[in-house]
Amino acid sequence: MSDYRLTATPALGQENSAKEVPDSFGLEENLSLALASVAARSTRGEEVSAILSGLLGGSVPKAGTLVEGEDHVAFWIGPDQWMVAASHDDRELLASELKERFGGTASVTEQNDGWVCLDVTGPDLPTVFERLAAADFHALEVNSAVRTVIEHVGCFLLCLEQDRHYRVFAGRSFAHSLHHAILTALKSTVAIRHAV
């Protein structure tokens, strides 16, 4: 029998990607989430919304929003489509659990290995992100979720704390490009502040 073991590899690799981040900011890969997409099947949108509402404690994310329940977070990704996240340690088999819950009303797809999740923290993040994407970041409130493009990479950006904590999801294959773009904007913002 082989002694080889499979080990999950972060999208940014094993190196410490936070080492170059300016002191007032945080930028790190979030490895703690299990992800699954939920898409209502034809004519089943209302049923799926009702089931999702029960999962999240009474609300369903509308366009541009996210809803945080007791154990799950969901955000809108398209008409009758949502991304659902939960603690990976508690719900590693999230997609299987959701398939049982939604039954034949929705198509559920595991997304764990398809995305990179970057948490960005620090002061006045709208000023940083307005260098990166075409969105009104100064208008973002807590529980906003916008679809945007950063460095030609399609992303979902969630506002977890107004002006101070954003979570960015993008395709895993773009992890290094996205990390580099955000890191460059953070450094640029700090340089400009010191120059003024």
Image (cartoon, rainbow, N blue to C red):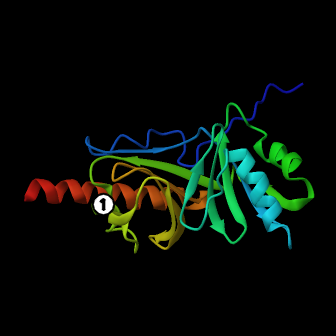
Tell me which residue sits at (86%, 50%) in the image.
99
x then y, percent, for residue 164: 34, 48
Query: Where is mark 1, residue-wise?
Result: 128
Q: Is 72 on the left-hand or right-hand side of 100?
A: left
Closest to the observer, 151 or 24: 24
State the image coordinates of residue 10 (x, y, percent, origin top left).
59, 43
- Residue that appears at 74% across and 35% down: 6
- Which corner quadrant holds the N terminus? top right
Q: Is residue 111 above or below residue 89?
A: below
Q: Amino acid at mark 1?
A: Val
Spot occupied by residue 142 in the image (x, y as percentages of width and height): 44, 53
Look at the image and tell me whether residue 34 can be seen: no
Q: Is residue 132 left or right of residue 114?
A: left
Q: Residues within 10 Å of mark 1 (few under 14, many from 20)?
A: many
In this view, the residue farthest toward the left is 196
Could you tell me if residue 58 is visible in this image? Answer: yes
Task: Provide the secondary structure element on which disc 1 rests.
Answer: helix
Q: Position of residue 191 (x, y in %)?
A: 17, 56
Residue found farthest to the right: 104
73, 112: nearer the viewer: 73
Please state which of residues 42 and 85 is positioned toward the viewer in this rendering: 42
- Residue sitting at x 31%, y 45%: 25
- Is 161 placed above or below 6 here? below
Above/below status of 74 relative to 9: below
Counting every numbered tag in the picture gives 1
19 and 33: which is toward the camera: 33
Report whether 4 appears left or right of 156. Answer: right
Quadrant in the rendering for residue 125: bottom left
